[in-house]
Amino acid sequence: MKVENTDALKRFPLTSNWYQKCCRNGFMAESNRIVGKRILLVEDDRGARESIKLLLTIDRHAVAEANEGTTALELLKSQPFDLAIVDYFMPGMRGSQLALRIREIAPSLPIIMITAYLEKLTAADKPVDVAIGKPFAIEDLRRAIAKLLA
């Protein structure tokens, strides 16, 4: 099939770096994206948990879900994970408490904390590798994952 030399192609030629030129927000190229990891997701809000899981499965991650800390710890003891993503504000066990318990069980497991209260938390509230404020974009999550697992 022959491609016509249209005005659109003149203005936006498909060069090897077209992706970087067209994306003003600096989204990561496909080659920099981390895919196929085993992730423990701990979020008490069902809607938020399902949304985050959807974002993660786009990048072919296997996601084990927990809606609270005790269930998350049971999952962590029963199977290996490459990364944990925990919400800060959950009933029963806060995300900071859960992160400390995760560190006892799996000291080298990277942890991302997601929270709507990022600006209010102190360093002691965030014993994690990366903290992301809610709401966040998929690219924020991808950057954090790439930082920790690259």
Image (spheres, rainbow, N blue to C red):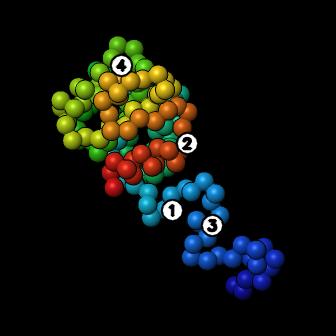
Residue kind at label 4, given as amino acid type: Arg
Residue at 47% across, 28% down:
118
- Residue 77 position, x and y percent, is 20, 32
Residue drawn at x 65%, y 64% is 22
Classify residue 26 by image quadrant. Answer: bottom right
Question: SS at mark 3?
Answer: helix
**Residue 13: % across, % down:** 69, 76
Q: Quick one: SS at disc 1?
A: loop
User: Which of marks 1 and 4 precedes in the sequence?
Assistant: 1
Spot occupied by residue 5 in the image (x, y as percentages of width and height) = 77, 83
- Label 2 SS: loop
Find disc 3 in the rendering and name its residue: 21
Of pointers 2 and 1, the one earlier in the residue sequence: 1
Query: Does residue 35 lie above or below 99 as drawn?
Result: below
Callout 3: few (<14), some (14-19), or many (20+) C-alpha neighbours within 10 Å? few
Q: How many marks?
A: 4
Circle 2 is placed at which residue position? 137
Q: Which numbered tag is attached to residue 150? A: none
Q: Nearer the viewer, mark 3 or mark 2?
A: 3
Left-right relation of 30 to 64: right
Mark 4: which secondary structure? loop
Residue at 32% from the left image edge and 24% from the top image edge = 124
Question: In which image quadrant can residue 114 be found?
Answer: top left
| Dot 3 or dot 2, earlier in sequence | 3
- In this view, the residue farthest toward the bottom is 2
Q: Which mark is on residue 94?
A: 4
> In the rendered image of this protein, does residue 79 appear above or below residue 93?
below
In the displayed structure image, the side of residue 81 where residue 130 appears, left or right: right
Of the image marks 4 and 3, the number of the one nearer the N terminus: 3
Task: Name the residue carrying label 1.
Answer: 29
What's the distance in space between the residues labelled 4 and 1, CA to CA? 35 Å
